[in-house]
Image (cartoon, rainbow, N blue to C red):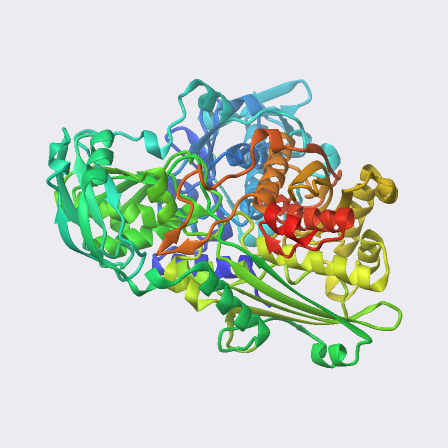
Amino acid sequence: MARFDDELAAVEARQGEARGISRRGFLIGTMAGSAMLAFGLSGIAEAASGSASEALAAGRYEPTIWYAIAPDGTVTVHITKAEMGQHVATSLARLVAEELEADWSSIEVVYVDSDPKWGYMVTGGSWSVHHSYLPLSRAGAAGRIALIEAGAKLLGVDAADCRARQGRVISGDQSIGFGEIVAQAGLERRFSEEELAQITLKPAAERRVLGTQGGAMDVPAKVNGEAIYGIDVSVEGMLHARPVLPPTRFGSKPLSVDDSAAQQVEGYRQTIELDDPSGVCQGWLAVIADSTSAAMRAADALKVEWQRGDSYAVTEADLQAQGHALVEAPSRDNGSLFVDIGDAAAGLEGASRVVESTYTTSSVLHFQLEPVNATVVEQDGHWHVHCGNQQQTLAVGMLAKALEVDESQVTLHQYYLGGGFGRRLYGDYTIPAALAAKALGRPVKMLFTRPDDTRFDCVRSPSVQRLRSGLDDSGRVVASEHAAAAGWPSAAMAPAFLAETVENGGKVDSFAISGADHWYDVGAQRVWAQQNHKAHEVFVPGYLRSVGPGWTTWAVEQHIDELALAAGEDPARFRLNLLRAEGRNAGQAPHSVGGAERLKAVLERAMAKADWDGRDSLPDDVGMGVALTFGQERNMPTWVACIARVRVDRGDGTVKVERLTTVADAGTLAHPDGAMAQLEGSLLWGLSMALHEGTEYEKGKPKALNLDAYTPLRMDQVPEMDLEFVDSDAMPVGLGEPGTTVVAPAIANAIQHAVGVRLRDMPMRAEALKAAL
């Protein structure tokens, strides 16, 4: 079955073909005293014709290259990913520096704009380091080879007698710096795709950068205030705007607008209705003013009579009811099969005992610190959009449609993101700013308030899941069926990313079902992905950190616990017995080498660290629960085991998470400090969603519009955390998301161990637990 990395490659290829970009291999050349390495992700950002030096001189590589070496030895790495707190530039620059043998103090980074020669630009899915590892590492290695060859000629020695270290080519007592080579040698070297693929990267024992400690490159600027976020952008002559949102995302329109009170606000100019050919801004208004403050106050004073869309009457309960109906009778009419192994129906029918459970999750909001915003400027028919964004290529296409121009007339300029978490994978928030700028013929900066942002959020869809598994007389799992219903973010935002199913001609949103294709051996297995179309009537289902596994792991890992209890087995050891590296669970090199054995290893280590064997001697109302995850995709697994220790207050039903013991195997850690921060942050957000976060839709919007009603984890609720990474030299994988998925089921399993109550609805509310005690 195709998965998302395959779909991304296909989309990139289509993008390249549409723009006339060819695949001609890897070129190194010189221009204006700089050595430039041109190698696009998946090969689509390469030279169209001619030699490296000719192409560079003609400007066809400016700036479509991974890095440049200046005559002073500075190595500038061009970053195509969005920086939103994960320190991605540090990790990617380390990939280049390791194989290039650059002096780390000479490394600088630049975040590039949306030029199509970068290929498909997206930051999400925990993909950044994993997908960049081979391209950037090979780019660094190829640069080292070219520099050694050129340096050897300048030193008058054989290249075989040279090595590169700390930004210098060395032969015996002689050496020459990379910058000197660039200035003198006139580099020109070509590598075919076949030659690139044959480059052998350094063995782990020889690494001098990857896996070593060190700070993140972006921290100083963020600490001293030099860092520029989208919200900081200011251009000459710009007006300020705030959107006025209709009562429903779809089908609304203003019937009358009274701005008499707004006119009393100093700095208010006018209110305009946005005409959007893309259909994103249905019935939107924009308040225009001389300052952000004036725009905010004038919008609050505006009186608008609306015609509401039909979804105004749809509630969260309606969405959940639709989900329940879908999982009770899953069909191809509302989705497709995601996994189909053996005869699950026969296995269930012949089982000695069938364990069945239904699990739900509520709507979850992003609530990133920086509300969405965009500043748009038109110059000579070209539209410049300034903001932070996680999927520039998609945003450019949306903007072009809204502005009714060709994509070549739109450039998205990238800034730091004050949080993304998947919200800024969809560039819908750039469109009203662009439409306002078009209507006014002036630069416009549009800033959403927190409630505006919340109402316009692309929420993580509520979900309903039904799992049924059969046990034989010995307690062995012989068959399992899993049906999950939710809104499909890719269907709403980027249909090109819908993956092929196990059936001919079918499509599925892997982002809405990944995690259900787990690494346990459960005999015959069938997984249904069902699209809750009613959710799409109310909002745009969005990608939120971990996406599908945020609900599928919640169900799978509780269901495994329920099977263990039904079989009379210890939940952790029951899992160990199901983790057999055989068949499809054996894993494949290089992405999932080791398979289920690596997941088994992190579980065994976590059990030892948490003193799992002593859990039956814990005090009353204190319990320990375990859960496992592999992250978002089977072909890019991050092996994680989490054991939660909780204390339940029988008086009010509150749950205190006392300790999280987590062991992760993420392969090679490009930047260990960043990796630990990612793991810590994701675990805490997983905890926040497990017990605190979640809202309900009613009257066209979430009930909770601000942080008074939407209450994420507070500092005094942070538990003791014992985190460990397995020492590994395997291919690096993703760390942005896996931790968010494993915490909730671990807590639910711990609650069951502590007080014998199984909570299957997330978030796990104190009132629900109190009622069950």
User: Is residue 769 left or right of 92 when viewed as pictured?
Assistant: right
Which residue is rendered at x = 75% and y = 81% of the image?
Answer: 349
Report x, y in % for residue 407: 28, 53
Q: Is residue 505 above or below residue 284?
A: below
Which residue is rendered at x = 79% and y = 80% of the image?
Answer: 350
Q: Is residue 562 above or below residue 338?
A: above
Q: Nearer the viewer, residue 240 or 116?
A: 240
Q: Nearer the viewer, residue 261 or 667?
A: 261
Report x, y in % for residue 343: 72, 79
Q: Is residue 451 above or below residue 521?
A: above
Q: Quadrant of residue 470?
A: bottom right
Q: Quadrant of residue 697?
A: bottom left
Report x, y in % for residue 432: 25, 47
Q: How many marks?
A: 0
User: Is residue 363 left or right of 159 when viewed as pictured?
Assistant: left
Decide if residue 508 is in sight here.
no
**Quarter of the rendering occupied by the N terminus:** bottom right
Q: Is residue 564 above or below residue 435?
A: below
Report x, y in % for residue 522: 76, 67
Decide if residue 172 is in sight here.
yes
Which residue is rendered at x = 14% and y = 49% of the image?
Answer: 257
